[in-house]
Image (cartoon, grey):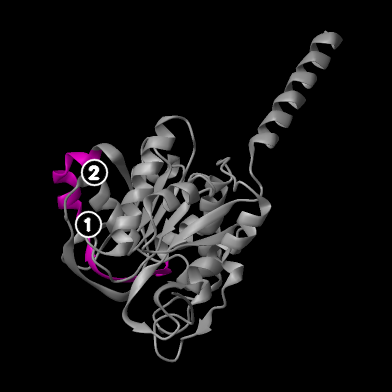
Protein backbone atom coordinates (compact mmCIF):
# COMPACT_ATOMS: atom_id res chain seq x y z
CA UNK A 1 0.00 0.00 0.00
CA UNK A 2 2.86 2.36 0.92
CA UNK A 3 4.61 1.69 -2.40
CA UNK A 4 1.35 2.41 -4.27
CA UNK A 5 1.01 5.77 -2.51
CA UNK A 6 4.63 6.64 -3.35
CA UNK A 7 4.04 5.69 -6.98
CA UNK A 8 0.86 7.82 -7.07
CA UNK A 9 2.71 10.81 -5.58
CA UNK A 10 5.55 10.37 -8.09
CA UNK A 11 3.15 10.25 -11.06
CA UNK A 12 1.23 13.27 -9.75
CA UNK A 13 4.43 15.29 -9.37
CA UNK A 14 5.61 14.23 -12.81
CA UNK A 15 2.34 15.26 -14.41
CA UNK A 16 2.42 18.57 -12.53
CA UNK A 17 5.93 19.21 -13.82
CA UNK A 18 4.88 18.51 -17.39
CA UNK A 19 1.79 20.69 -17.06
CA UNK A 20 3.82 23.58 -15.62
CA UNK A 21 6.44 23.24 -18.35
CA UNK A 22 3.74 23.56 -21.01
CA UNK A 23 2.50 26.89 -19.66
CA UNK A 24 4.05 29.95 -21.29
CA UNK A 25 4.50 32.48 -18.52
CA UNK A 26 5.85 35.17 -20.86
CA UNK A 27 2.88 35.56 -23.24
CA UNK A 28 2.97 38.21 -25.95
CA UNK A 29 -0.31 39.34 -27.51
CA UNK A 30 -0.79 41.25 -30.72
CA UNK A 31 -3.24 44.16 -30.88
CA UNK A 32 -4.54 45.26 -34.28
CA UNK A 33 -3.99 48.82 -35.35
CA UNK A 34 -6.48 50.67 -37.53
CA UNK A 35 -6.29 53.57 -39.90
CA UNK A 36 -7.01 57.08 -38.63
CA UNK A 37 -9.81 58.88 -40.42
CA UNK A 38 -7.55 61.93 -40.65
CA UNK A 39 -3.81 61.16 -40.83
CA UNK A 40 -1.59 63.01 -38.36
CA UNK A 41 2.00 64.18 -38.77
CA UNK A 42 3.04 61.33 -36.44
CA UNK A 43 1.35 58.66 -38.53
CA UNK A 44 -1.81 57.29 -40.11
CA UNK A 45 -2.81 54.38 -37.83
CA UNK A 46 -3.37 53.92 -34.11
CA UNK A 47 -4.00 51.66 -31.13
CA UNK A 48 -5.76 52.93 -28.01
CA UNK A 49 -3.35 52.55 -25.08
CA UNK A 50 -6.13 51.17 -22.85
CA UNK A 51 -5.97 47.82 -24.69
CA UNK A 52 -2.25 47.62 -24.07
CA UNK A 53 -2.59 48.45 -20.36
CA UNK A 54 -5.47 45.99 -20.08
CA UNK A 55 -3.35 43.09 -21.31
CA UNK A 56 -0.29 44.18 -19.39
CA UNK A 57 -2.34 44.31 -16.17
CA UNK A 58 -2.78 40.52 -16.38
CA UNK A 59 0.84 39.73 -17.18
CA UNK A 60 1.12 39.90 -20.96
CA UNK A 61 3.34 41.99 -23.18
CA UNK A 62 2.00 43.55 -26.35
CA UNK A 63 3.11 43.80 -29.97
CA UNK A 64 1.35 46.20 -32.35
CA UNK A 65 -0.06 44.53 -35.46
CA UNK A 66 0.23 47.29 -38.03
CA UNK A 67 -1.78 47.72 -41.20
CA UNK A 68 -0.29 47.63 -44.72
CA UNK A 69 2.21 44.83 -44.15
CA UNK A 70 2.66 41.75 -46.33
CA UNK A 71 0.98 38.42 -45.64
CA UNK A 72 4.43 36.88 -45.08
CA UNK A 73 5.11 39.49 -42.38
CA UNK A 74 1.78 38.75 -40.71
CA UNK A 75 2.43 35.02 -40.88
CA UNK A 76 5.84 35.46 -39.30
CA UNK A 77 4.30 37.61 -36.56
CA UNK A 78 1.49 35.10 -36.01
CA UNK A 79 4.08 32.38 -35.40
CA UNK A 80 5.83 34.63 -32.88
CA UNK A 81 2.96 35.80 -30.65
CA UNK A 82 0.57 33.93 -28.39
CA UNK A 83 -2.77 35.50 -29.23
CA UNK A 84 -4.35 38.50 -30.88
CA UNK A 85 -6.90 41.10 -29.82
CA UNK A 86 -9.17 42.82 -32.33
CA UNK A 87 -10.02 46.13 -30.61
CA UNK A 88 -13.00 48.44 -30.90
CA UNK A 89 -13.10 51.30 -33.37
CA UNK A 90 -14.99 52.64 -36.34
CA UNK A 91 -13.68 51.18 -39.60
CA UNK A 92 -15.30 49.10 -42.34
CA UNK A 93 -15.72 45.41 -41.48
CA UNK A 94 -15.04 44.21 -45.01
CA UNK A 95 -12.67 46.56 -46.81
CA UNK A 96 -10.54 48.39 -44.23
CA UNK A 97 -6.94 47.55 -43.47
CA UNK A 98 -8.12 46.40 -40.04
CA UNK A 99 -10.58 43.99 -41.66
CA UNK A 100 -7.97 42.56 -44.03
CA UNK A 101 -5.45 41.99 -41.24
CA UNK A 102 -8.12 40.46 -38.99
CA UNK A 103 -9.07 38.06 -41.80
CA UNK A 104 -5.45 36.99 -42.17
CA UNK A 105 -5.03 36.26 -38.47
CA UNK A 106 -8.43 34.58 -38.24
CA UNK A 107 -7.56 32.20 -41.09
CA UNK A 108 -4.12 31.46 -39.64
CA UNK A 109 -5.68 30.80 -36.22
CA UNK A 110 -8.30 28.44 -37.66
CA UNK A 111 -5.59 26.47 -39.46
CA UNK A 112 -3.26 26.41 -36.44
CA UNK A 113 -5.91 25.36 -33.91
CA UNK A 114 -7.14 22.61 -36.21
CA UNK A 115 -3.59 21.20 -36.05
CA UNK A 116 -3.47 21.40 -32.26
CA UNK A 117 -1.46 24.65 -32.22
CA UNK A 118 -3.33 26.69 -29.58
CA UNK A 119 -3.85 30.31 -30.57
CA UNK A 120 -6.59 32.49 -29.00
CA UNK A 121 -8.41 35.46 -30.53
CA UNK A 122 -10.37 38.13 -28.67
CA UNK A 123 -12.71 40.64 -30.30
CA UNK A 124 -13.97 43.74 -28.46
CA UNK A 125 -16.85 45.83 -29.89
CA UNK A 126 -15.73 46.33 -33.51
CA UNK A 127 -13.60 43.22 -33.03
CA UNK A 128 -16.67 41.29 -31.89
CA UNK A 129 -18.52 42.47 -34.99
CA UNK A 130 -15.54 41.52 -37.17
CA UNK A 131 -15.61 37.99 -35.77
CA UNK A 132 -19.28 37.60 -36.68
CA UNK A 133 -18.50 38.66 -40.25
CA UNK A 134 -15.40 36.46 -40.58
CA UNK A 135 -17.30 33.41 -39.33
CA UNK A 136 -20.55 33.91 -41.26
CA UNK A 137 -19.24 35.67 -44.36
CA UNK A 138 -22.14 38.09 -44.03
CA UNK A 139 -22.92 41.47 -42.48
CA UNK A 140 -25.63 40.52 -39.99
CA UNK A 141 -25.66 43.52 -37.66
CA UNK A 142 -28.71 45.50 -36.55
CA UNK A 143 -28.78 49.16 -35.50
CA UNK A 144 -29.23 49.58 -31.73
CA UNK A 145 -29.42 52.48 -29.31
CA UNK A 146 -26.28 51.49 -27.40
CA UNK A 147 -23.79 54.25 -28.08
CA UNK A 148 -22.73 55.31 -24.60
CA UNK A 149 -24.51 53.21 -21.99
CA UNK A 150 -23.40 50.95 -19.13
CA UNK A 151 -25.41 47.76 -18.67
CA UNK A 152 -25.58 44.66 -16.47
CA UNK A 153 -25.19 41.39 -18.37
CA UNK A 154 -28.01 38.90 -18.88
CA UNK A 155 -26.31 35.52 -18.50
CA UNK A 156 -27.47 32.50 -20.47
CA UNK A 157 -27.70 29.05 -18.92
CA UNK A 158 -24.51 28.06 -20.74
CA UNK A 159 -22.41 30.80 -19.15
CA UNK A 160 -21.84 28.94 -15.88
CA UNK A 161 -19.98 26.13 -17.66
CA UNK A 162 -18.27 28.33 -20.25
CA UNK A 163 -14.51 28.55 -20.44
CA UNK A 164 -14.72 32.31 -19.96
CA UNK A 165 -16.90 32.58 -16.87
CA UNK A 166 -16.80 29.23 -15.07
CA UNK A 167 -13.91 30.19 -12.78
CA UNK A 168 -14.99 33.77 -12.06
CA UNK A 169 -15.59 34.52 -8.36
CA UNK A 170 -19.24 34.51 -7.34
CA UNK A 171 -19.18 38.16 -6.30
CA UNK A 172 -17.89 39.25 -9.71
CA UNK A 173 -20.58 37.23 -11.47
CA UNK A 174 -23.25 38.75 -9.24
CA UNK A 175 -21.96 42.25 -9.96
CA UNK A 176 -21.86 41.66 -13.72
CA UNK A 177 -25.45 40.39 -13.60
CA UNK A 178 -26.89 43.09 -11.34
CA UNK A 179 -24.83 46.26 -11.78
CA UNK A 180 -24.37 48.45 -14.88
CA UNK A 181 -20.62 47.83 -15.16
CA UNK A 182 -20.19 46.92 -18.83
CA UNK A 183 -19.49 49.93 -21.06
CA UNK A 184 -21.23 49.87 -24.44
CA UNK A 185 -20.18 52.23 -27.24
CA UNK A 186 -21.60 50.63 -30.38
CA UNK A 187 -24.27 51.58 -32.90
CA UNK A 188 -24.58 48.09 -34.34
CA UNK A 189 -25.24 44.77 -32.65
CA UNK A 190 -25.74 41.11 -33.48
CA UNK A 191 -29.41 40.59 -32.65
CA UNK A 192 -30.53 37.29 -31.17
CA UNK A 193 -32.79 36.95 -34.20
CA UNK A 194 -29.87 37.33 -36.63
CA UNK A 195 -27.77 34.87 -34.65
CA UNK A 196 -30.56 32.30 -34.69
CA UNK A 197 -31.01 32.68 -38.44
CA UNK A 198 -27.30 32.13 -39.16
CA UNK A 199 -26.33 28.48 -39.20
CA UNK A 200 -22.65 29.45 -39.37
CA UNK A 201 -22.84 31.51 -36.18
CA UNK A 202 -25.07 29.02 -34.32
CA UNK A 203 -22.67 26.19 -35.06
CA UNK A 204 -19.54 28.17 -34.21
CA UNK A 205 -20.35 30.44 -31.24
CA UNK A 206 -22.07 29.84 -27.94
CA UNK A 207 -23.95 32.85 -26.53
CA UNK A 208 -22.86 33.56 -22.95
CA UNK A 209 -24.65 36.86 -22.31
CA UNK A 210 -27.25 39.03 -23.97
CA UNK A 211 -28.51 42.59 -23.56
CA UNK A 212 -31.27 44.80 -24.88
CA UNK A 213 -31.70 48.43 -25.83
CA UNK A 214 -35.41 48.13 -25.04
CA UNK A 215 -36.31 47.16 -28.58
CA UNK A 216 -33.61 44.79 -29.83
CA UNK A 217 -32.20 41.85 -27.88
CA UNK A 218 -28.58 41.33 -28.88
CA UNK A 219 -25.58 39.11 -28.16
CA UNK A 220 -23.13 40.80 -25.79
CA UNK A 221 -20.65 38.00 -25.00
CA UNK A 222 -19.80 34.84 -26.91
CA UNK A 223 -17.17 32.13 -27.19
CA UNK A 224 -16.53 29.60 -29.92
CA UNK A 225 -17.38 25.98 -29.20
CA UNK A 226 -14.27 24.40 -30.69
CA UNK A 227 -11.76 27.26 -30.92
CA UNK A 228 -10.31 29.65 -28.31
CA UNK A 229 -12.11 32.59 -29.90
CA UNK A 230 -13.98 35.09 -27.70
CA UNK A 231 -15.96 38.26 -28.21
CA UNK A 232 -17.57 41.01 -26.14
CA UNK A 233 -19.71 43.71 -27.70
CA UNK A 234 -18.88 45.73 -24.57
CA UNK A 235 -15.52 47.16 -23.48
CA UNK A 236 -13.91 45.45 -20.46
CA UNK A 237 -10.75 47.60 -20.82
CA UNK A 238 -12.50 50.97 -20.41
CA UNK A 239 -13.51 50.57 -16.76
CA UNK A 240 -9.95 50.90 -15.52
CA UNK A 241 -8.14 52.83 -18.22
CA UNK A 242 -10.52 55.32 -19.87
CA UNK A 243 -11.98 58.43 -18.22
CA UNK A 244 -13.25 60.65 -21.04
CA UNK A 245 -16.87 59.49 -20.88
CA UNK A 246 -18.93 59.84 -17.66
CA UNK A 247 -20.90 56.70 -18.51
CA UNK A 248 -17.82 54.49 -18.08
CA UNK A 249 -18.15 52.67 -14.72
CA UNK A 250 -15.28 52.97 -12.23
CA UNK A 251 -16.75 51.22 -9.18
CA UNK A 252 -14.74 48.57 -7.30
CA UNK A 253 -16.85 45.82 -8.86
CA UNK A 254 -16.25 47.29 -12.33
CA UNK A 255 -12.51 47.18 -11.67
CA UNK A 256 -12.70 43.55 -10.53
CA UNK A 257 -14.64 42.59 -13.64
CA UNK A 258 -12.01 44.18 -15.87
CA UNK A 259 -9.21 42.32 -14.11
CA UNK A 260 -10.88 38.93 -14.40
CA UNK A 261 -11.67 39.43 -18.09
CA UNK A 262 -8.05 40.36 -18.80
CA UNK A 263 -6.77 37.52 -16.64
CA UNK A 264 -8.88 34.99 -18.53
CA UNK A 265 -7.61 35.99 -21.98
CA UNK A 266 -3.98 36.28 -20.92
CA UNK A 267 -4.22 32.80 -19.41
CA UNK A 268 -5.53 31.58 -22.76
CA UNK A 269 -2.45 33.12 -24.40
CA UNK A 270 -0.24 31.26 -21.92
CA UNK A 271 -1.37 28.03 -23.61
CA UNK A 272 0.34 29.08 -26.85
CA UNK A 273 3.93 27.99 -27.44
CA UNK A 274 4.72 30.45 -30.24
CA UNK A 275 8.07 32.22 -29.89
CA UNK A 276 10.05 34.86 -31.72
CA UNK A 277 13.03 33.46 -33.60
CA UNK A 278 15.43 35.51 -31.47
CA UNK A 279 15.44 37.71 -28.39
CA UNK A 280 16.53 40.63 -30.56
CA UNK A 281 13.52 40.22 -32.87
CA UNK A 282 11.20 40.00 -29.87
CA UNK A 283 12.53 43.18 -28.28
CA UNK A 284 12.31 45.05 -31.56
CA UNK A 285 8.64 44.07 -31.99
CA UNK A 286 7.35 45.06 -28.54
CA UNK A 287 5.18 48.12 -28.13
CA UNK A 288 7.70 49.44 -25.60
CA UNK A 289 9.52 50.83 -28.64
CA UNK A 290 6.71 53.37 -29.07
CA UNK A 291 5.44 56.18 -26.86
CA UNK A 292 1.71 56.77 -26.28
CA UNK A 293 0.51 60.33 -26.57
CA UNK A 294 -2.11 62.03 -24.41
CA UNK A 295 -5.27 62.40 -26.48
CA UNK A 296 -7.91 62.59 -23.76
CA UNK A 297 -8.68 66.25 -24.44
CA UNK A 298 -9.80 65.57 -28.01
CA UNK A 299 -10.73 61.90 -28.37
CA UNK A 300 -12.42 59.01 -26.58
CA UNK A 301 -9.04 57.60 -25.55
CA UNK A 302 -6.87 58.96 -22.76
CA UNK A 303 -3.71 57.80 -24.53
CA UNK A 304 -3.05 56.57 -28.06
CA UNK A 305 -0.18 54.90 -29.88
CA UNK A 306 0.23 56.34 -33.38
CA UNK A 307 2.15 54.55 -36.13
CA UNK A 308 3.53 55.49 -39.52
Q: Which residue is mark 2?
A: 201
Q: Which residue is mark 1?
A: 190
Residues 75 and 125: in front is: 75
Res. 171 in view: no
Q: Residue at x 71, y 30 (%)?
A: 16
Q: Secondary structure at mark 1?
A: loop
Residues 84 and 167: in front is: 84
Res. 212 in view: yes
Residues 262 and 100: in front is: 100
- Nearer-N-terminus badge (2/1): 1
Look at the image and tell me in which quarter the C terminus lies: bottom left
Q: Magenta span covers which residues?
A: 179-202
Residues 43 and 185: in front is: 43
Q: Is residue 231 magenta?
A: no
Look at the image and tell me in which quarter the N terminus lies: top right
Q: Is residue 198 magenta?
A: yes
**Tag 2 and tag 1, C-beta contact below 8 Å:** yes
Q: What is the spatial separation of the Cα atoms under label 2 and label 1, in whole angstroms?
A: 10 Å
Q: Residue at x 69, y 29 (%)?
A: 18
Badge 1, how many Cα within 10 Å: few under 14, some, many 20+? Answer: many
Image position of 211 (left or right of 194): right
Image position of 122 (left or right of 146): right
Q: Residue at x 44, y 52 (%)?
A: 73
Badge 2, how many Cα within 10 Å: few under 14, some, many 20+? Answer: many
* Whole-percent x, y for residue 15 in the image: 70, 25
Image height of 71 relative to 14, above or below: below
* Whole-percent x, y for residue 205 in the image: 31, 43
* Whole-percent x, y for residue 287 in the image: 56, 66
For residue 22, which numbered disc appears in the image?
Answer: none
Amino acid sequence: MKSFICLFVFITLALSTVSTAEINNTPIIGVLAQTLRTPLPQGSSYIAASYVKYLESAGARVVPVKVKQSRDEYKRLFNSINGVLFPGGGVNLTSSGYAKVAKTFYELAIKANNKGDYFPIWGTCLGFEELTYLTSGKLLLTATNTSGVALPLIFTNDSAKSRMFRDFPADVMRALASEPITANFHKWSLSIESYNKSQELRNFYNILTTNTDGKVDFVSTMEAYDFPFYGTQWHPEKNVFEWTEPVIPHSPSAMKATFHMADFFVNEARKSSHRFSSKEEELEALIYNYCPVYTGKKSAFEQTYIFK
